[in-house]
Image: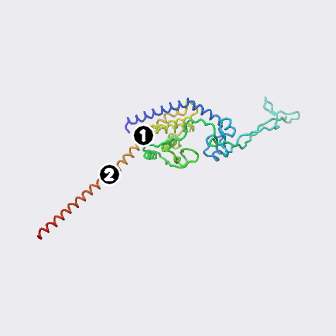
Amino acid sequence: MPQNDNDNVNNKVKEITDRLEQGIGELFESQQYKDYLTTMSKFHSYSFNNIVLIFSQKPNASLIAGYNAWKTEHQRQVVKGAKAIKILAPAPYKVKVQRNKVDPNTRKTILDENGDPVKETVEVQKPYFKVVNVFDVSDTEGKEIPSIGIGELSGNVEKYDEFFEVLKKICPIPIEFEHINTGAKGYYSNADNKIVINKGMAQMQNIKTAIHEMSHHYLHSRDTPNFSEDKTRNSKEVEAESVAYTVCQHYGIDTSDYSFAYIATWSKDKEMPELKASLDIIRKTSSDFIKKIDGHMQELYKEKSAVYENNHTEEKTSVIGKLHSNQEKLIEGEQKQSKISERKQERV
């Protein structure tokens, strides 16, 4: 690719990522985002064990709370017949026990006149867990939960088949479509060395998801030069979504609302530390993707043009051949007719 073309791509990528940064900043300042954070603060963070329990019982669960919490804190009611998700909640209890009395200054056991340890009764807390019922937001109804717009992209993409074919060509690992029951739109599997996209989504969502997961492979897999142990999950998600937004925007696929909301949920505060720290790598990766896509697009169109020309050349050759054949038959027929006429004249 000529140098001026490279410069044009780099300049356009910078323009798009500047717009991304501005859009995220405006979202952080909005009342919508503040309402979202206020609501999210009322949901508890669960332990790893409880996350496993929740996933095993309701894989597509998103927001979890107890029956009373839904009612009093969120003004929502659990629907009749909803199946509870059972998790473990801490329920420590206190008991009185006897132990050796210790001198607070020397930290040594106090002895009586017989040399035996002096005992004292103290109250200690014993760890204990009990099973409690919680419910997912999908099993409730009532006041709307504030959202910052992460739904699902819809709409078709011009030349979708060609574009997706090129994405598969520039991706060093397979891209497959499968039904994903967890609610995820796609994932990159380092163990299976493949990218999976949820079946049944719109063309725009498919493309954005593919580029997002390709970015994870390109930037975050251990066998790539861009891998870093220091990156948090927040940083990885912000980088992948930012690259997807930038590349899509370059080709006229507008994912602004979706991407801004996605990045906002992974950024810890309105200072956007993850985005700012990663802007250089986001811009470089986006430029690399765009240049590769453009290059393969040109090759694809050349191949298709060549096939088209060959087909039409064959058709033209075939038509000309038929014309020549017909002309030869016509001449041959005229010659035969002429000979017949000559013989008739000789007889006469």
Q: Residue 37's x, y, as percent?
A: 60, 33
Q: Quadrant of residue 129?
A: top right
Residue 198 visible at all: yes
Outermost residue on the front side: it is: 348
Question: Along the line of sight, which residue is nearer the eye, 227 or 30?
Answer: 30
**Label 2 amino acid?**
His
| Residue 295, image x, y percentages | 40, 42
Q: Report which residue position mark 2 lands on.
A: 312
Inspect the image, locate mark 1, and give the three-letter code of the amino acid beneath it.
Answer: Lys
Determine whether, in the image, residue 309 is placed left or right of residue 186: left
Quadrant of the drawing holding the N terminus: top left
Q: Residues within 10 Å of mark 1 (few under 14, many from 20)?
A: some
Q: Which residue is mark 1?
A: 291
Is 219 in front, or is 56?
Answer: 56
Residue 13 point in image, percent of width and height: 45, 35
Dot 2 surroundings within 10 Å: few (below 14), some, or many (20 or more)?
Answer: few
* Residue sitting at x 46%, y 43%: 156
Q: How many marks?
A: 2
Q: Is residue 224 visible?
A: no
State whether residue 322 is above or below residue 65.
Answer: below
Quarter of the rendering occupied by the C terminus: bottom left
For marks 2 and 1, give the CA distance.
32 Å
